[in-house]
Structures are given as structure tokens and as C-alpha cells.
Amino acid sequence: MSKGRKEKNTKNIRTLLFNAETPVRVITLITLYRIVTFPLLVFLIFTDRVNTFKWLLLASFTTDAIDGFLARKYQATSTLGAKLDSVGDDLTVLAAVIGLCVTKFEFIEKELTLFLVLFGLFLIQLISSLMRYKKISSFHTYFAKAAAVITAIFLLSVFFLDKIIYPLFYASFIITGIELIEETIIVFLLPKWKTNVKGLYWILKGKLHSKA
């Protein structure tokens, strides 16, 4: 696919896998890897195969960075692809959190309030998006990308170092909280579903320019 050309309105996975341009197909396969790996990760953690779990978790987080890089490089984006990417991201984090609950339950108990705060913010954002757009959001803001990186580093550090690095945990909590609040505000500002939104600042800036 030549740079600047985009896949925008693909309606089904089959089209992405078999009829789209090569970069789109590759990116879709990488994204689907994270989704289909989720049940395997859950199985591994509940069968006490933590070593295999942590390496597959690392692979899942790595594929998130790879497909994002490829999508930007080849301008190979699609509405369905963005949705699948968000699902894959959420499932990977969910698998890691389940792993935390199984292997570091005392930590979960200690920081339960903060986890509940994030879960509450996530529910508010999710419900707002479903009510507004009839589907989950996939804004991919700069804050979302920063939160994803820091959260991935924190979660991987837990399983590879077998300890909690609290500065990383609190940084992840703060940035993820800000990201969820920002995305909730964006839902109310954008009348139509949109992906690859830079952030609240750029939306407000665009609205001001349109009024000028």
C-alpha cells in the first residue's frame, strides 16, 4: 500500500484478512494474535504456568507496539481494525490484571481502592461511548498511548522481576485515570465516532478555529 492511501470502512474481518492490501492484512493478523491469545493467557495463569504466561504477555504487549507502528508507517487504518486493536489492548491488560489477582492478591487487596477508581472511570467512559455511538470508542489519544506504555512496563515488571515497583504503579494509575477522564469528555464533544484522535486539546483547538 502506498503511503497516504487508507482503508477506512472495511466491514468484516474476512475482508481485512483476504481482500485488503498486504500491510492491512499483516496488521490485522498481529492484532488478532492478541485477541486469540487472551484465553490461553488465562489458562496459563490458572494452571500455574507463570513463566510461559509472562513471555506470551510480553509478546502480546510487543505486538501492540508493532501493529501501531506499521499502521502509522503505511497509513493502513480502518474502522474495524481500530476496533479490533482496542479490543486486543483491553484483553491483554485484562489478562495481566487476572495474572496479578492470581499471583499478587495481597497487592490487589492493598490497592483495591485505586483499582476500583480506575474500573469506575472505565465503566463511565464505556457506557458513555455505547450511549453516544452505540459502540466502544477507539480514540487512540496520546494519553492513551502513554498510559498503555507505562501500564505495560509496570505489569511486565511484576511478572519478570517478581515484585511491585510502586512508582511505576502510581504513574500508571495517574496517567490511566487522566486518559479515561479525557476520553469521557471527548465522547461528549465528538458527535460522531472517530478514531486516531490526538487528544482533548486538539479537539478544542479545532472547535475554536472553526468558530473563528
Image: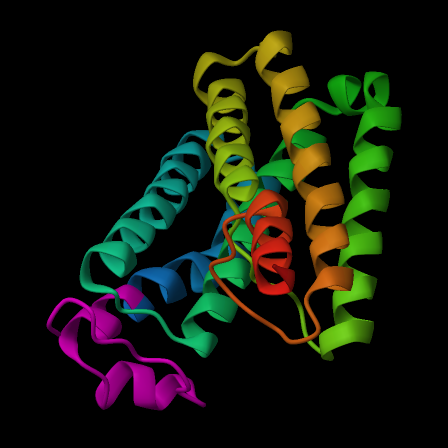
Foreground of the two, 205 or 147: 205
Left or right of residue 155, residue 54 in this image: left
Residue at the image point whose x is 75% and y is 24% from the top: 105
Q: Position of residue 149 (x, y in %)?
A: 46, 32
Q: Is residue 74 above or below residue 149?
A: below
Examine the image and state in which quarter residue 172 appears.
top right
Whether residue 47 is visible, yes or no, is no
Residue at the image point whose x is 14% and y is 66% from the top: 3
Q: Is residue 87 above or below residue 81?
A: above
Q: Which residues fall within the magenta stretch?
A: 1-27
Quadrant location of the N terminus in the rendered image = bottom left
Foreground of the two, 97 or 44: 97
Residue at the image point whose x is 25% and y is 73% from the top: 24
Q: Position of residue 99 (x, y in %)?
A: 61, 35
Q: How is the image coloured?
A: rainbow
Left or right of residue 30, residue 5 in this image: left
Let me know if residue 17 is in the magenta part. Answer: yes
Residue at the image point whose x is 86% and y is 36% from the top: 116
Q: Is residue 69 above or below residue 162?
A: below
Left or right of residue 198, residue 137 in this image: right
Question: Which residue is outermost to the front?
Answer: 212
Left or right of residue 190, residue 63 in this image: left
Q: Position of residue 44 (x, y in %)?
A: 51, 44
